[in-house]
Each structure stands twice: as C-alpha cells, then as structure tokens.
Image: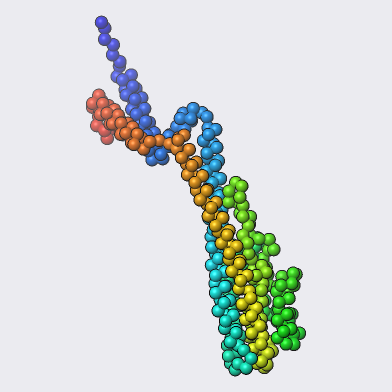
Amino acid sequence: MSLQSIGDLAQSFLIRSRTAQVKSELQRHNTELSTGRVADIAETLRGDFTGLSAIEHGSTQASAFSESIRETVIHVEGMQDRLGAIAEDGARVASQLATALDGAPPGIVDSVASIGAGAFDSAVSNLNARVAGRALFAGAASGGPALAPGGEILAALSADTAAAENPAELETAVLEWFEEPGGGFDTHAYRGSGTETGPASLSESESMTLPGSAASPEMRRHLAGLALAALVDDGAFSGDTRARSETLRRAGQKLAESQPGIVAMSAKLGTAEARIETIRVRNTAESAALEMAREELIGIDPYDAAVRLEQARSRVEMMFALTARLQRLNFSEHLR
C-alpha cells in the first residue's frame, strides 16, 4: 500500500482555505447572535420571501400608525389642558363679576372689569397655544394661530359696538358679533379653519377628526362673556358706574351660562381619548404579533447561536494553532 502526500504549496492552500471558511462561520454566528436573526435570510426561506414581505409591510404600517396615534394623543392632551385652564378661569371670573352689582363703588367696578379683561387675554392665549408646532384650536389650519391678538379683537369689537347706548344693547351687539356666521368674529378674530383637525389615520380602517376649535359655538359664547367685561375695562360707558356695573353683571351671567358648553367640549375630547387608547392597544398587540411571526421565520435561538459561536471560535483558534505549528509561526505573525 502506497502513501500519498501533498506538497507544501497545496498544503498551504488547503490550510488557508479552511481558515477562511471557519473565520466566515465565526463572523456569521457573531452577526446572528448580535442581531437575533439568521445571517442568510434567502437560504433560510429557500428564496420564498412572500411571508416575510407581508410581515415587513404590516410592521411598517403599524409603526406609521403608532406615530400618528402618538401625535394625536399629544394634540388631544394639549387641548384638554388648555380647556381645563379656560374653564377654571371662566368659573372664577364669573363669580367675581357677580360682585360688581349696582351701587358698588367705582373702584370695585374698575377692579372687576380689569379681572375680566385679563381673563379674556388669557383665554385668547390658551386658544392660540401650540404643541409640536401645531395650533391646538385652529381646526385644520394648524400652521398658524387660531385667533388674532386679544388687543386687535377688542379694538374691532369696540368699533363695531360703539353705537350701543345701554348695557342691554351692548350685550346684544357683542353676542351678535361673536355668534353670527360671517360676522365680526369670523372677519376680525378667527384665523383658523372651519374644518375640524384631521382626519388622522390611526389604523387601516379607522381615522379621527378632533372636535372643538376656537370658533365652536361653545367657545364663542365663552369669549363673548369675557369680551363684554373687557369692553368695560376698555372704557365702555365711561363715567357711568351704574351702567358699567350692570354690563359686568351681564358679562358674568353669560360667562356662567357658557361653562356647561366648555365642559361638553372637554367631554367630547375625553371620548376621543378613550377611542384613541382602544386603537393604540390594538395596534400594539398587532405589532407584537407581527414581531413574533418575523422571529418564527428568521429569528434564531440565542442559546444555540452562542454555542455555535463558541464552537466556531474554537475551530478558528485550532486552525491558527495548526498553522503556527506547521509553519513555525505564532498567532501574531500569522496575522501580518
């Protein structure tokens, strides 16, 4: 029986080839362990990407819906916060306006009128609030403010109601200015859209428009009550304490009457929040299910991957040791 051997060149080639192979295996197992997925997806799926493509498409959609839901939640929470502040101010000022009764000293009347004017400016500021660069109460026109500055609104209102000769006429004129379609409020005050905010796509089958804007009937009545008091602070019926006091009383009454409407706006938003949360939970569950399906297709067992990585590392070390022994090289010289 004869023995066959290979030459030094062939032996070197064989060792280099085997070393490259085990190093490639080491890199593949290392990649799989770090990513949690197979390195060669095509081989694992045998070239059939249909299922994986459907999962990836679903995951992309779920991520987009999650972002839309997140932005919508931020918007609704911002509206709720501002409505809460408006309602709180309204209840407080309505109570204070009631103190400006007939016969009150001029100083008290002036002080209460000033409170009403401050509350009007505060309400305008709250309605012009923005979150994440979007106006909260401007409807679909969320790129700009919902209302003109408070000073501009009062200037236009004062000019349009200057003919009123008594508190009753002024109250009627102010209410018409705010509530009449196409009237002074629409012309001089509101800068938003008549269309509600949205619709925001929250799932494949559900979208949502957000109720409520600075031009809603409830908010118009609320602003009208505050503006009536602000006109007194601005000089309406100057010198006639009795007429000023009567105007403030009427303003307080209108403001109190508007409070249920503000609460109703907040309740509508609360209903929207509940619906959004239901959709969010469902979307989260769908995302988790898609991730599990993806793992079943191209995921790896971390423990098994770690074992194979260690085996590959041992083979690489063995090949380097063998190379060093055959060629009388140490590991660092081999790497050169």
Q: Is residue 45 above or below residue 261?
A: above
When asked about the image quadrant of residue 93, the answer is bottom right
Q: Is residue 102 above or below residue 252?
A: below
At horizontal 31% and vertical 20% (from top left) the residue drawn is: 11
At horizontal 61% and vertical 47% (from top left) the residue drawn is: 205
Q: Which of 220 and 16 is in front in this view?
A: 220
Q: In this view, does 309 lie to the left or right of 65?
A: left
When asked about the image quadrant of residue 170, the answer is bottom right
At horizontal 52% and vertical 29% (from top left) the residue drawn is: 48
Protein image colouring: rainbow
**Can I make out residue 175 in this image?**
yes
**Can I make out residue 149 in this image?**
no
Q: In this view, does 53 lie above or below 138?
A: above
Q: Is residue 172 left or right of residue 248?
A: right
Q: Which of 322 and 36 is in front in this view?
A: 36
Q: Extreme top residue here?
A: 1
Q: Is residue 77 above or below residue 241?
A: above
Residue 37 spot, x, y in % from top left: 42, 37
Quarter in which the N terminus is drawn? top left
Residue 103 spot, x, y in % from top left: 62, 93
Q: Nearer the viewer, residue 87 or 237?
A: 87
Quarter in which the C terminus is drawn? top left
Residue 15 spot, x, y in % from top left: 32, 24
At horizontal 28% and vertical 13% (from top left) the residue drawn is: 5
